[in-house]
Image: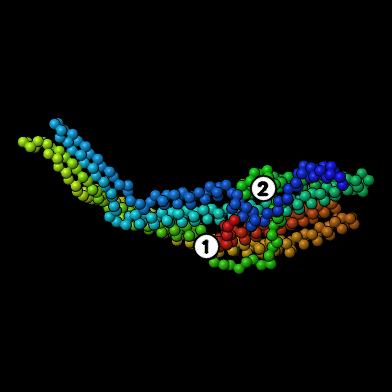
Amino acid sequence: MKPAPLLALALTLLATPATPAATPALTADSAARLALARNPELRAARQLITEAQARARGTGRLANPEVELEFGAGPDGEGRVAAGLTQRFPLTARLRWERRLSALSIETARLEVRERERQLVAATRSATLELAAERETLAVLSRQRDAAETFARTLEAGTREGLASPLESGEAALAAATLSTALDARRAREATLAGQLATLLGQPADAPISVRPPPALPSAPPANRSPGFLPALRLAELLAQSGETEVSLARASRWEDIGVGLFAEGERLRDEPGGLEPEALVGVRLTVPLPAWRDGSAAVAEKQAAADRHRQQRDATRLAALNAALAAHRTMTARHRAATLASTQLVPAAQRQATAAETAHQRGEIDAATLFLARERLTAAELAAIDARRDFNLAHSDWLAAIGELTPTP
């Protein structure tokens, strides 16, 4: 091949845009990982940790030293100059309690972020399962609609040839139109679910989202397990610790800081008959505030009440977590029974009935209305099976969240 054609081929390849790789279909787990990496509200919430760390750098420190300067002048060269430096120190362990409270606030911020991550994972998993089930529903309705339209056209042709009654043809057309209406309504719901999932994933609603079909139904539901690490429960325990620390800090703050300072004074006074004589003085100053009018007892009582409230809230949160885990497992077990019944008994029975009705209609043994009824029952059975499997998957996700096994890690 000559150089010129080679150059033209190279330029053609460079000018041809590369075909973008197809976006892999999302599962509930992969969508949750994507949400943890992209959700804008979660990125904003993570700044709570930075804010708490910044606040902690300014707590548990001594007050700034105070510098005092004084100058006075009188007649005939008399005057006075004084300078001092005062540093305030706490009489109690107030600074240690402040540092302890700051450390707890950082851990509290981390747990608040973990709880938001857990909620985001749970919401994203649910949204993904809902969207996958809705698209499966659309596929069933679309298939049934196409079959109904084909049957309606067949009856219409038979009506023209005198092989079918206009009433049957009209019923078939009405059945096809009913399925089309239901299909449009479910498409609107599918658009709503896709928009909700897009928001959780941190992407625009017009971006395409591909999800995998709902997971298959397991042979048996998972065995019940005790809750593991729950950010909300750990957060309640940490708030109770913070309440106790605030009580200790309030007690330590009843005595204000004492002031210890050094000062130097220089003075020049007229002393007759000797004239102006200078004098110098160096000393130590001690300032001790007395809790006479504001002894801090009210602040201690307030913090003590708050600590009691946090302890009661911790106990309530622990009880709610245990009950939620047990209720979620019971719900999941019931959903599994319903989904198993729908998939193994309801749908096969409806399929057999619809097949038998079609055969009977072809033989002229039943009218079109009976055939339409059998097909409607088949559609209802398939949709019920999809809803039951979706409800089980949602209940399973809720149970995992209740026992703390939805690990919020990207």
Q: What secondary structure is found at the residue carrying circle 1?
A: loop
Farthest residue, direction front: 3
Q: Which mark is residue 369?
A: none
| In front: label 2 or label 1 | 1
Q: Which mark is residue 229?
A: 1
Q: Position of residue 3 (x, y in %)?
A: 84, 44
Q: Position of residue 124 (x, y in %)?
A: 61, 53
| Visible residue check, residue 390 | yes
Q: What secondary structure is found at the residue carrying circle 2?
A: helix
Left or right of 187: which side holds 44? left
Q: How many marks?
A: 2
| Visible residue check, residue 300 | no
Q: Position of residue 326 (x, y in %)?
A: 55, 64
Q: Amino acid at mark 1?
A: Phe
Upstream in sequence: badge 2 or badge 1: 2
Q: Position of residue 259 (x, y in %)?
A: 25, 49
Q: Amino acid at mark 2?
A: Ala
Crowd class of label 1 (few under 14; some 14 to 19; many from 20; radius 10 Å): few
Farthest residue, direction left: 273
Mark 2 to mark 1 CA distance (whole Å): 31 Å
Q: Residue at x 65, y 56 (%)?
A: 30
Along the viewing direction, whichever of 200 and 172 lies nearer the viewer: 200
Along the viewing direction, whichever of 197 and 315 lies nearer the viewer: 197
Left or right of 257: which side holds 312? right
| Residue linked to disc 2 | 194
Quadrant in the picture for the C terminus: bottom right
Left or right of 146: which side holds 313? left
Left or right of 52: which side holds 332? right
Colour scheme shown: rainbow
Q: Residue at x 48, y 62 (%)?
A: 319
Q: Residue at x 28, y 50 (%)?
A: 88
